[in-house]
Image: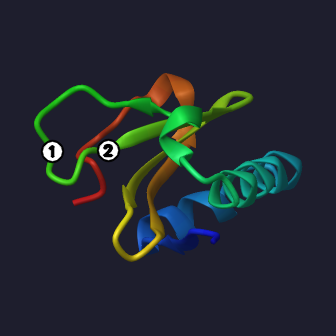
Amino acid sequence: MRYRLFFSATARREITRIPRDDALKIGEALVSLAGETDPRRQVKRVQGGQNPPFYSLLVGEYRAILTIVDDVMVIHVIEVGHRRTGIRDGGR
């Protein structure tokens, strides 16, 4: 069973501001991640005590910050940005 992808308003806005080719690569990587039986094996957990925990998916020069909710099979993309910018506030 596939996970469903949801994007925060911030993530949608940020993905429209990056070059189209990079945005397509990020989209393809997220769709591929949603098809995994255990998507946590493909991402890195972000340090900190967030609940639910945040994960980082690197795609080229960009990073997507997301949460994974197993009981409803959802991957929620919180933030997308260049790797050097880091995590601002976790999308909150």
Q: Residues within 10 Å of mark 1 (few under 14, many from 20)?
A: few
Q: Is residue 63 above or below residue 16?
A: above
Q: Is residue 52 left or right of residue 29?
A: left
Q: Is residue 80 left or right of residue 33?
A: left
Please name the amino acid that badge 2 sits on.
Answer: Phe
Please name the amino acid that badge 1 sits on.
Answer: Gln
Q: Report helix, strand or loop for mark 2.
A: loop
Q: Position of residue 61 (x, y in %)?
A: 69, 28
Q: In this orientation, which residue lies closer to the viewer: 7 or 39?
A: 39
CA distance separating discs 1 and 2: 7 Å
**Among the 4 quarters of the image, the one containing residue 69:** bottom left
Q: Quadrant of the N terminus?
A: bottom right
Which residue in the structure is indicated by mark 2? 54
Q: In this orientation, which residue lies closer to the viewer: 61 or 4?
A: 4
Q: Position of residue 49 (x, y in %)?
A: 10, 36
Q: Report helix, strand or loop for mark 1.
A: loop
Q: Position of residue 55 (x, y in %)?
A: 40, 40
Q: Is residue 69 left or right of residue 19?
A: left
The structure residue drawn at horizontal position 66% and vertical position 52%, both measured from the top left corner, is 36
Q: Quadrant of the C terminus?
A: bottom left
Q: Are marks 1 and 2 in contact (CB under 8 Å)?
A: yes
Which residue in the structure is indicated by mark 1? 50
Q: Which mark is residue 91?
A: none
Number of marks:
2
